[in-house]
Image (cartoon, grey):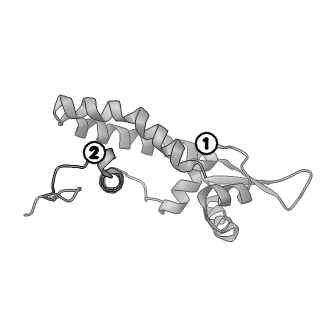
Amino acid sequence: MKEFSPVPVTASAPAATPAEGGHADAAAEFLAALSAVRRTARRATRQTWSADPLPVAQSELLRLVLAQPGISVAEAAAELRLAPNTVSTLVGRLVTQGLLTRHRGLSDGRSVFLAVTAKAHKRIVDYRDLRAELTQAAMAELAPEDVTALVNAVPAMQRLATRLAQP
């Protein structure tokens, strides 16, 4: 059986320094590696997870509503970069599953505000904990210098996310 490698292994010349214009190649490699980690972490978690997995769009909406209780459907659509009618459809499915509640605005009955249910909160926390546990186990198998490099990269990755979010 062929061993799975989540990141394509390629033979390439040494990375160019930023002064030599190496940012584009470094950015592409970084994003490929980041995507591979996210994809394989999601796959490993779903294979271990006992509940039926939610579609990615529903999961993203639940996490957003958990982070921003009372967010409106319109605000959620803008935040997720989805059409409002798509978010409304997702909300309907999550309400049916008992994972979201929606409340009409007092001043404008057309506005709908969202909140996660206790069932959804537990599901999100349990999934996040399982994913962290699986990642911790995988990191324990890495060389100590790799673990140190990953831990030290977190602040820079957070700053990169902030920069990417700016217009």
**Residue 136 in view of the camera:** yes
Q: Position of residue 75 (x, y in %)?
A: 71, 55
User: Measured along the vertical axis of the image, is residue 114 above or below residue 159?
Assistant: below
Q: Nearer the viewer, residue 95 or 44?
A: 44
Q: Earlier in the sequence, mark 1 or mark 2?
A: 2
Circle 1 sits on which residue?
A: 67
Q: Residue furthest front?
A: 19
Three-letter code, disc 2: Thr
Q: Quadrant of residue 135?
A: top left
- Image point 73% across, 46% down: which residue? 70
57 left or right of 114 in image:
left
Q: Identify the element where label 2 is drawn.
A: loop
100 left or right of 51 in image:
right
Q: Quadrant of residue 5?
A: bottom left
Q: Position of residue 93 (x, y in %)?
A: 61, 65
Q: Nearer the viewer, residue 149 or 12?
A: 12
Q: Identify the element where label 1 is drawn.
A: helix
Q: Are marks 1 and 2 in contact (CB under 8 Å)?
A: no
- Quadrant assignment for the N terminus: bottom left
Q: Position of residue 12 (x, y in %)?
A: 15, 57
Q: Position of residue 126 (x, y in %)?
A: 45, 41
**Residue 44 in view of the camera:** no
149 left or right of 162 in image:
left
70 left or right of 80 in image:
right
- Image point 88% across, 59% down: which residue? 109
Q: Quadrant of residue 51?
A: bottom left
Three-letter code, disc 1: Ala
Q: Residues within 10 Å of mark 1 (few under 14, many from 20)?
A: few
Image label count: 2
Q: CA distance from mark 1 to mark 2?
A: 38 Å
Circle 2 sits on which residue?
A: 17
User: Measured along the vertical axis of the image, is residue 118 above or below residue 80?
Assistant: above
